[in-house]
Amino acid sequence: MRQMLINELTKDERERIKKFLDENVRPGGVAGLYWLAIPERLWGEAQRGHEACGPFSFAIELGGDFISLELLVRSASNLHCPCTGYATAEQRHLLLEFLDRLTGELAIRA
């Protein structure tokens, strides 16, 4: 799996990240899982024409001492559709900007 990972988080960093995620992204159905929505203007060719499969999101996992941001664009309703796939350059940029915002605002040593 292609992903960005920050590990060796302190307990304080993890708690600050959890609060940030709780306030800024949609929680998943499992503890520690979050969904970062991809705006329609950034949908790639794979997602266009697949509105029924949306919304499209990146998975973010917050573990005991790590945060992982997947580079896979996921469909909310159809796991086996070709609209699920790795991020385009523009979508990766969105994820990097989110990570920069998170680490900058929270002063996370990365």
Image: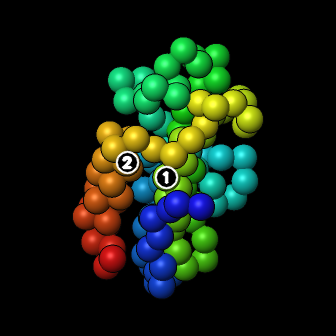
**Colour scheme of the rendered structure:** rainbow
Q: Quadrant of residue 42?
A: top left
Nearest the eye: 27 or 84: 84
Looking at the image, residue 50 sits to the left or right of residue 78; the answer is left
Q: Residue at x 60, y 46 (%)?
A: 27
Query: What is the crowding at mark 1: few (fewer than 14 residues within 10 Å), some, or many (at least 20)?
Result: many
Q: Is residue 58 something one can see in this rendering?
A: no
Q: Quadrant of residue 26?
A: top right
Please say if 83 is above or below 107.
Answer: above
Looking at the image, residue 25 sits to the left or right of residue 34; the answer is left
Query: What is the crowding at mark 2: few (fewer than 14 residues within 10 Å), some, or many (at least 20)?
Result: some
Looking at the image, residue 17 sits to the left or right of residue 64; the answer is left
Contact flag, marks 1 and 2 (Cβ < 8 Å):
yes
Q: Quadrant of residue 107?
A: bottom left
Total labels: the figure holds 2
Q: Which residue is mark 2?
A: 92
Q: Which residue is mark 1?
A: 71
Q: Position of residue 88 (x, y in %)?
A: 40, 41
Q: Residue at x 33, y 77 (%)?
A: 110
Q: Is residue 64 something one can see in this rendering?
A: yes
Q: Which amino acid lies under the numbered mark 2 shown in the image of this protein?
A: Arg
Give residue 3's mark.
Answer: none
Q: Position of residue 2 (x, y in %)?
A: 52, 60
Q: Where's the N terminus, which quadrant?
A: bottom right
Q: Secondary structure at mark 2?
A: helix
Q: Residue at x 35, y 58 (%)?
A: 99
Q: Position of residue 80 (x, y in %)?
A: 74, 35
Q: Earlier in the sequence, mark 1 or mark 2?
A: 1
